[in-house]
């Protein structure tokens, strides 16, 4: 999505009303809290451009193989030093995107441009060492991602040697290991370098996993639920570390999570996934304060909220989308509280929404906002107010 | 609450016997659950929340041993029961819902058989009426009765958890013990199941002992919450009050550990350091090495749980330096 191509149709549809305007709108001035953290400025050209990504898994054996549509027409740009969060329920395809980008899975169709290069065309089978040096992963489970028989220094030396950051064993290598450990806040570094994974807590192990990713000086880190297995009190430390590394080294992140509040905290943009479609995307604040897609609204209603009331009814039923042989309509149509006839007939195309000066594209895939639904403005007005 | 509490745990202490000495996982924990009340135990992994609850149900196996305290259920001491008494007591009086519904259900039996099994064992019901009752129970938790003949693998994760809840409610127990019942589920399914439980609770009047590490969820769902840190209760208060006016530095740190969904975005620090190694817990207050407000007195002795307000108790020297009772009996914890 280039800025020029979209400008002409960007300002067509207004944003939906904010979810809870009275409660939260005036928060900025009233509270005695530290100043809001500014979002990073977007510079240069995208480091990652994904276009029309599709993944079909063949499931079932023997005579009856079926096509499971895990990803449909996924397109987005990621800029250096930017964080995009992918949120959605399990099975929505968010981890599949990471697997394809880390080249563990081959996409069925689509293109991936990394630093302007068409990766799938240049390296069709396996990723080159160069690509792997630029794109690193952090996994969910810090108990499974480190080798229990080796010490921490070993885990960090391997990528340093493999990727030629340091030539051979020696004091330079040891020094680099210590620097990495200090970068991720594991001090005294010399002591941690000698430890085995079982001698460390979950948060410390996740810091080692981050240090290991940093060893090769990557431009993009794919983080798959990096804090979901950690204790609540140490999650912020990991998120803040990721945020600092972003600012300091200009690393871009693709952050997969089901924790929407953490997405809002760390991500500049948030994309909501449902049934392998990106149903809505935009700047994290705007998206979560003014959700447009009925599924995004449902997700936000369901997020546990200490101020909330457990009995507040959800706007839509739970249910699972049809991934095998989906019909022609919108995948959310069978659950959607605002379903219309057209929703069963065709899958909506992304509609740009009016932006609020934050400079990030805002789109939604929903017939409520598309031109095909004639009563767009009416349906917006008639949306139930959330209280 | 004027009436007698349903469950009353007093000074419960549980130790794990290890070759390198005993590890005290639960240390002098006291709480009460009233009838129709939802009580939550929150804490990080290793804080002893599951151990405390399991001990209260007498479900612990060696190497875990209960070394002190008492657990009264409707005035009856659970810790003094014989095995045979326990067998009738469990499920009839306290039923359990665990995190992983997939592992709680038998994969080779239909859902109906598994619900009927409870009724036949405990109530001596004949197969046909038991199945009929099973179908009623399924409807109660929002599943169509036609699913009686389904096997667990044919159900979604949310439906399996509903079946487990149906089994737990089969004997109409006054207390339900739920250990992270929705952790493995998506947020939308989680919300639906909790709403269902809350409705059933109002309808049937049971109490819930709820365990989770998700503090937002706990504050939304529970009436009263106890915060455990390193095996000891740091604070115990009605949920709304705990959220609005947390007193213990650990609770306050926790409140700054999950980002908000609304409002302006500002940096949150969480709590520095990591939870203590329970084999060598810190001297004095267990939290002092991570506490911003800790002073030299915090290293000296373990703070006791003292009354800070109506139904609000905290264990911190800094919060109420003058209120620490000389005689612990004076300010014994009561809800």
Image: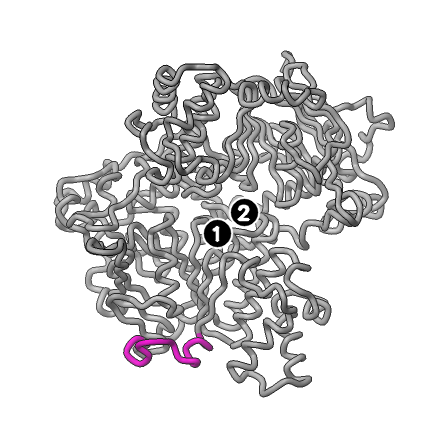
Quarter of the image with the C terminus of chain B in it: top right
Quarter of the image with the N terminus of chain B in it: top right
Nearest the eye: A332 or B172: B172
What SS does tag 1 mark? helix
Residue B281 x %, y %: 77, 47
Residue found at the far bottom of this picture: A167
Residue B70 appears left or right of A285: right
Residue B298 x %, y %: 81, 44
Find disc 2 in the rendering and name its residue: B258
Q: Quadrant of residue A384?
A: top left
Residue beneath the point at 56% across and 82% down:
A161
Find disc 1 in the rendering and name its residue: A262
Residue A143 shows in the view: yes
Residue found at the far top of this picture: B3
Do the dots labelled 1 and 2 sit on one chain? no
Nearest the eye: A4 or A215: A215
* Vertical relation: B307 (above or below) A127: above
The question of residue A61 being in magenta is answered with: no
Q: Chain of mark 2?
A: B
* Vertical relation: A72 (above or below) A259: below
The region drawn magenta spans A120-134
Residue beneath the point at 36% across and 72% down:
A46
Q: What's the distance in space between the residues labelled 1 and 2, CA to CA?
A: 8 Å
Q: Disc 1 vs disc 2: Cβ atoms closer than 8 Å?
A: yes
Residue A16 x %, y %: 29, 45
């Amino acid at each position: 999505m280039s800025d020029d191509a979209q400008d002409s149709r960007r300002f067509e549809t207004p944003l939906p009303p904010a979810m809870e305007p009275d409660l939260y709108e005036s928060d900025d001035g009233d509270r005695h809290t530290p100043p809001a953290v500014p979002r990073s400025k977007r510079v240069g050209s995208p480091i990652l451009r994904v276009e029309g990504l599709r993944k079909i898994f063949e499931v079932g054996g023997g005579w009856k193989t079926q096509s499971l549509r895990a990803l449909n027409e996924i397109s987005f740009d990621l800029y250096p030093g930017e964080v995009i969060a992918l949120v959605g329920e399990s099975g929505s395809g968010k981890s599949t995107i990471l697997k394809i980008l880390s080249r563990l899975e081959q996409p069925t169709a689509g293109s991936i441009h990394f630093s302007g290069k068409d990766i799938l065309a240049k390296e069709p089978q396996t990723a080159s060492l160069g690509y792997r040096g630029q794109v690193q992963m952090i996994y969910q489970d810090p108990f499974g991602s480190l080798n229990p028989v080796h010490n921490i220094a070993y885990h960090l030396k391997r990528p340093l040697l493999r990727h030629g950051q340091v030539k051979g064993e020696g004091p330079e290598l040891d020094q680099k290991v210590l620097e990495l450990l200090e970068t991720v806040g594991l001090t005294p570094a010399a002591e941690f370098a000698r430890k085995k994974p079982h001698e460390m807590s979950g948060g410390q192990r996740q810091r080692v996993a981050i240090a290991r990713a940093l060893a090769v000086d990557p431009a993009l880190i794919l983080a798959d639920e990096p804090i979901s297995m950690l204790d609540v009190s140490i999650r912020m430390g990991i998120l803040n570390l990721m945020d600092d590394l972003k600012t300091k080294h200009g690393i871009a992140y693709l952050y997969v999570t089901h924790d929407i509040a953490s997405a809002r905290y760390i991500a500049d943009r948030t994309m909501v996934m449902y049934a392998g479609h990106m149903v809505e995307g935009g700047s994290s604040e705007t998206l979560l304060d003014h959700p447009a897609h009925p599924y995004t609204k449902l997700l936000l209603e369901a997020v546990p909220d200490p101020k909330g009331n457990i009995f507040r009814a959800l706007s839509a039923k739970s249910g699972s989308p049809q991934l095998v042989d989906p019909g022609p309509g919108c995948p959310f149509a069978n659950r959607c509280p605002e379903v219309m006839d057209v929703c069963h007939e065709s899958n909506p195309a992304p509609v740009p929404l009016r932006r609020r000066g934050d400079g990030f594209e805002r789109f939604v895939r929903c017939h409520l906002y598309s031109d095909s639904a004639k009563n767009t403005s009416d349906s917006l007005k008639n949306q139930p107010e959330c209280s | 609450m004027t009436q007698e509490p349903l469950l009353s745990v007093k000074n419960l202490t549980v130790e794990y016997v290890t070759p390198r000495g005993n590890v005290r996982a639960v240390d002098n924990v006291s709480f009460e659950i009233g009838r129709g009340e939802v009580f939550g135990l929150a804490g990080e992994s290793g804080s002893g929340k599951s151990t405390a609850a399991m001990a209260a149900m007498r479900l612990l196996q060696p190497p875990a041993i209960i070394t002190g305290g008492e657990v009264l259920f409707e005035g009856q001491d659970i810790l003094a029961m014989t095995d045979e008494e326990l067998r009738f007591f469990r499920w009839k009086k306290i039923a359990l819902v665990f995190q992983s519904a997939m592992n709680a259900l038998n994969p080779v039996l239909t859902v109906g058989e598994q619900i009927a099994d409870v009724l036949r064992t405990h109530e001596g019901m004949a197969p046909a009426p038991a199945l009929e009752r099973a179908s009623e129970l399924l409807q109660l938790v929002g599943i169509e009765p036609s699913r009686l003949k389904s096997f667990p693998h044919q159900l979604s994760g949310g439906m399996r958890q509903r079946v487990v809840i149906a089994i737990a409610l089969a004997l109409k127990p006054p207390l339900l013990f739920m250990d992270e019942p929705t952790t493995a589920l998506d947020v939308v399914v989680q919300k639906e199941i909790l709403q269902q439980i809350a409705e059933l609770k109002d309808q049937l009047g049971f109490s819930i002992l709820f365990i989770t590490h998700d503090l937002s969820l706990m504050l939304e769902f529970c009436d009263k919450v106890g915060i455990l840190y390193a095996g000891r209760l740091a604070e115990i208060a009605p949920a709304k009050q705990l959220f609005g006016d947390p007193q213990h530095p650990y609770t306050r740190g926790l409140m700054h550990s999950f980002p908000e969904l609304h409002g302006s975005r500002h940096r949150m620090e969480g709590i520095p350091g990591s939870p203590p190694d329970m084999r060598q817990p810190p001297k004095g207050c267990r939290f002092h090495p991570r506490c911003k407000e800790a002073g030299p007195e915090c290293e000296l002795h373990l703070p006791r749980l003292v009354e800070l307000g109506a139904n609000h108790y905290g264990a911190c020297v800094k919060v109420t330096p003058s209120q620490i009772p000389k005689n612990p009996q004076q300010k014994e914890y009561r809800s």
